[in-house]
Amino acid sequence: MEKPRRGIQSVEIGTQLLVALGRHVAPMALRDLGKAAGVPVGKAHPYLVSFLKVGFVVQDSAGRYELGPLALQLGLAKLQRLDPIKEASPLIEALASETEQSIAVAVWGNFGPTVVRLEEPIHPLHVNLRTGTVMSLAYTATGRLFAAYLPPKVVEKMMVDDLARLRGPAGGRGTEELSQSQLEALLVETRMHGMSRTLGQPIPGIDAFCAPVFDSTHNIVLGITAMGPEATFDSDWEGRVAVPLRACALEISRRLGYVPPEVPAARG
């Protein structure tokens, strides 16, 4: 076991104050800030004096504190260095191991949702999927996820082409044709559950979930897809595939600076 490393307690306390400031949109009074950070007011004040001197925080005319220009500079510097695929890679390896399913990472490319990383479990899934594969917008979990979270103007032309392709001479090879109203209902379902799902389509016998990864501006940057044979794939929205997949996507989003919107408290 790794020995716990000794740190500097004052740095950790100061960080608690900065994190508390970062979680609040409006400037905070010293008393409120100390309470939110779990630091006594008398102990918090010297930290804030030092943070004021270096520009980590600023004060408004009422003496309330908020994050300052140095915090912004450091945040922007980190954002410029972020690589969503790099951040996702170690987490999807663990996800493939935990779920024992194939995991694909997709980005939005010039031709639609495109697989850029594929992580296979111990027993690989024998389907025609590889890095560079462009996924159907209408008929795959990956495609529906991007269709649900990208602006309609971005996907509408490609969606029309995708639906028309199934009606062409080649057909959908057994894929059930979707109407526009059916597709819209599936996109609503995707937003409601925070992930998309396909059951036995477009490949018979293969089920899939796809969860979104968002960046600091709440834009979708990746789709994380888990797929496997229906005989061993738990397709329940709160099952042993969906839950860790959702948690994995959220953790990658968090590493990219995404802050989930607060859920309003239920009224009694």
Image (tube, rainbow, N blue to C red):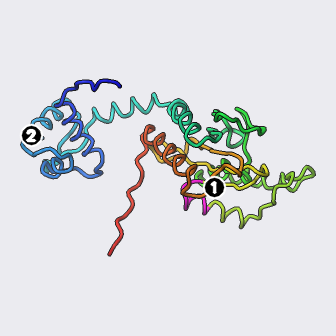
Label 2 is placed on what type of residue?
Lys
- Sequence-earlier tag: 1 or 2: 2
* Nearest the eye: 67 or 260: 260
* Nearest the eye: 204 or 9: 204
* Nearest the eye: 251 or 144: 251
Q: Residue at x 28, y 26 (%)?
A: 4
Q: Residues within 10 Å of mark 1 (few under 14, many from 20)?
A: some
- Where does label 1 land, which residue? 235
Q: Residue at x 72, y 65 (%)?
A: 182
Label 1 is placed on what type of residue?
Ser
Q: Is residue 218 visible?
A: yes
- The magenta-colored residue range is 188-195
Please state the horizontal and vertical placement of residue 142, each as a whole percent of the image: 66, 47
Q: Note whether 267 is above or below 2 in the view shown.
A: below
Q: Is residue 236 left or right of residue 46?
A: right
Q: Is residue 261 left or right of residue 140?
A: left
Task: Identify the disc placed on residue 43.
Answer: 2
**Magenta span includes 189:** yes
Please state the horizontal and vertical placement of residue 152, each as a whole percent of the image: 63, 55
